[in-house]
Image (cartoon, rainbow, N blue to C red):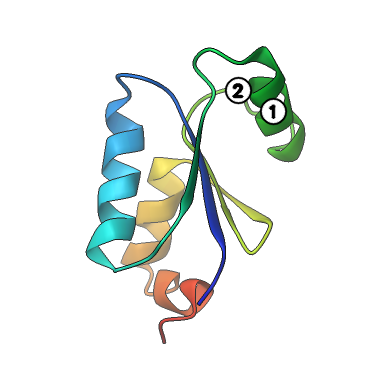
């Protein structure tokens, strides 16, 4: 199974939706809350090519994007293979 990392923030509906989709698929993920850590936020921005919004999602160190991007992969039938489920 793929390594999944998700950078999140407090009270973020998009973060909750992304985590819910991953949980529904039975995927374990490493969550990093950047709400109170400027170092973690800077790490996220650096890895995500300058993107500052949460969530930012990585699958096997590949930047997937945010919640909408994750759901777009699901709609296109590509998420399972990226996650190593197919």
Q: Secondary structure at mark 1?
A: helix
Q: How many marks?
A: 2
Q: Residue at x 28, y 58 (%)?
A: 23
Q: Give the residue number, with chain letter if any, for mark 1.
A: 45
Q: Residue at x 72, y 30 (%)?
A: 43
Q: Give the camera-side residue of 15 and 26.
A: 26
* Residue 41 place in picture, x, y as percent: 64, 22
Q: Give the residue number, with chain letter if any, for mark 2.
A: 52
* Residue 15 place in picture, x, y as percent: 36, 35
Q: Quadrant of the C terminus?
A: bottom left
Residue 47 to residue 5: above or below: above
- Marks 1/2: CA distance? 6 Å
Q: Secondary structure at mark 2?
A: loop
In the image, 35: left or right of 60? left
In the image, 45: left or right of 29? right
In the image, 20: left or right of 32? left
Q: Mark 1 or mark 2: which comes first in sequence?
A: 1
* Label of residue 2 in the image: none
Q: Residue furthest bottom?
A: 86
Residue 85 to residue 58: above or below: below
Q: Mark 2, residues whose alpha carbon is within 10 Å: few (<14), some, or many (≥20)?
A: few
Q: Mark 1, residues whose alpha carbon is within 10 Å: few (<14), some, or many (≥20)?
A: some
Q: Residue at x 30, y 68 (%)?
A: 26
Q: Residue at x 33, y 24 (%)?
A: 12
Q: Quadrant of residue 74?
A: bottom left
* Residue 30 place in picture, x, y as percent: 50, 49
Q: Are marks 1 and 2 in contact (CB under 8 Å)?
A: yes
């Amino acid at each position: 199974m793929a390594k999944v990392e998700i950078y999140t923030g407090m009270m973020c509906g998009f973060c909750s939706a992304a985590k819910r989709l991953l949980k529904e698929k039975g995927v374990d993920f490493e969550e990093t809350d950047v709400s109170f850590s400027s170092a973690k936020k800077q790490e996220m921005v650096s890895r995500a090519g300058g993107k500052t919004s949460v969530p930012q999602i990585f699958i096997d160190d590949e930047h997937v994007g945010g919640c909408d991007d994750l759901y777009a992969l699901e709609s296109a039938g590509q998420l399972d293979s990226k996650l190593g489920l197919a």
